[in-house]
Image (cartoon, rainbow, N blue to C red):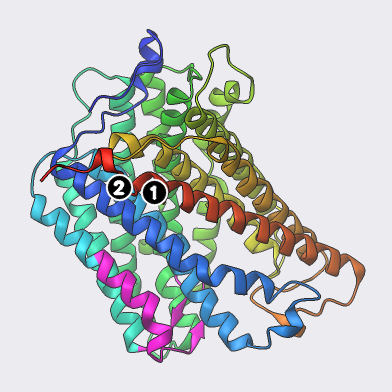
Amino acid sequence: MKTESLTNNPIIDGYALDVQGGSNGRLAIGWLSLAMGSLVVGGLFTILIVLSRTPGIQEIFPWVDFFHTALVVHVDLTVLVWFLSFAGVLWSINSREACIPCGWLALVLAIAGAAIISLSPFLGAGGPLLNNYVPVLRDPIFFTGLGIFGLGFTVLVLRGLLFSIPVGNTISGGGALRFGLFTGLLIALLSILALLASYFGIPEGTEGSHYYELLFWGAGHTLQFTHTQLMLVVWLWLATVAGSAPRITPRVTLFLFALGALPALATLYIYFAFDIGSPYHLLAFTIQMQYGGGLAALPVALVLISVFFPGKLPLTDQQRGIRSALQFSIILFGAGGIIGYLISGSNVTVPAHYHGSIVAVTLTFMGLTYYLLPRLGFKTPQGRMVRLQPVIYSVGQLSHITGLAWSGGHGVQRKTAGAAQGLEGIEKIAGMGLMGLGGLIAVVGGVLFLVIVFKSMWPSEKNKTPS
């Protein structure tokens, strides 16, 4: 199946990838199904999490321990599993028809691991620890699921590194996107190695939350560069299919992808230069993210500024939804970056920062899902809801992070719920009220996305294969 050409401009036509059928197409469908499933299960915990922190409602949710357990599962499913599963979609699309059993092994392991993570609270897993990047439940069941999922992701990365479609001798827009996807694989491998280095290098006697903070700190920071690289690939792809010309040559794009990957190499230096248990190790990764996280994102966003202006060509519902997802992704990524510079202490400004950034990535994946569905053999998303869903979701998330950032500036601490938040003043109550309202609006937008996708994936009579 070939991507549709919107114009005769070779630059526009080039910033898209062919979505082929065959084994890799089926693998992409499998990873997309896992990604959607992780959002469904993770979303079941979202409403309780938001309500348990919303003034006036939080009093009827006295289960603070459940709040923390739900938060662990929610974060791991809606960030870790969702992001890495969608990476599986992209890397499967960009793979050659080789070592197909390896691809299925990676997918099966990831599905099994995600299922165990989801079920672990109902199988008695408890002891939530809200460390950064990969919060955990201190229970063998949970760690078994996490380990199996991690093994599946490792197989996915190794297959991608060995069997990705090459960039080609002639640098094209599609080739530049393939290079961006490949840099994401290299950084992902570096993140896996960082996790192993931390596991074997954590000082003896380190326990509790601090142990898992050290375990996932380096790998988690490094993996963010993979997410950003994939987001930039999808930004250019979405701009192309939504009818906005990315006025940038493939050679410059390739350079920007290399520039975006460059800060991730600092991971090697940090592990060699600083002991894992030292404060310098933690600080170095913070600096790496602070000054390197948006190195390529800013110039790419400036190139795509045209997506904020109406084009001359009429757009379909699908293209309008894609365009809105791209627009708000750029806005939220910028907002998250700005909020990051306002962080002072461990308050809710921190989740405001990373919610802006991760939602920006999520929006690009939502937009690309709308584009990929008909190319993977499903129905084309249509209707008013396709146009409105990214707007509803984004407005909710913008309100959510604004409320968090405002409340953080007034001292509301992160990872607390109920009375522990200490919402005495009108500023704190108003900020967290805006957070709660925005969160609920975002939940509606997220549910609409799932409804649209599952409606498109649901088999219809005309799509059924005759027996």
Q: Quadrant of residue 433?
A: bottom right
Q: Is residue 34 above or below residue 365?
A: below
Q: Residue at 47% of width from left, 31% of height from top?
A: 318
Image quadrant containing the N terminus:
top left
Mark number for residue 226? 1
Disc 2 residue crowd, few under 14, some 14–19, many 20+, Cα 10 Å: few
Pointer 2 residue: 459
Q: Position of residue 2 (x, y in %)?
A: 25, 24
Q: Residue at 22% of width from left, 59% of height from top?
A: 107
Is residue 92 on the magenta stretch?
A: no
The one nearer the camera, 177 or 222, is: 177
Residue lying furthest top: 8
The one nearer the camera, 236 or 339, is: 236
The one nearer the camera, 55 or 162, is: 55
Which residues are the magenta region? Answer: 110-139
Q: Residue at 81% of width from left, 62% of height from top?
A: 431
Q: Residue at 15% of width from left, 61% of height from top?
A: 105
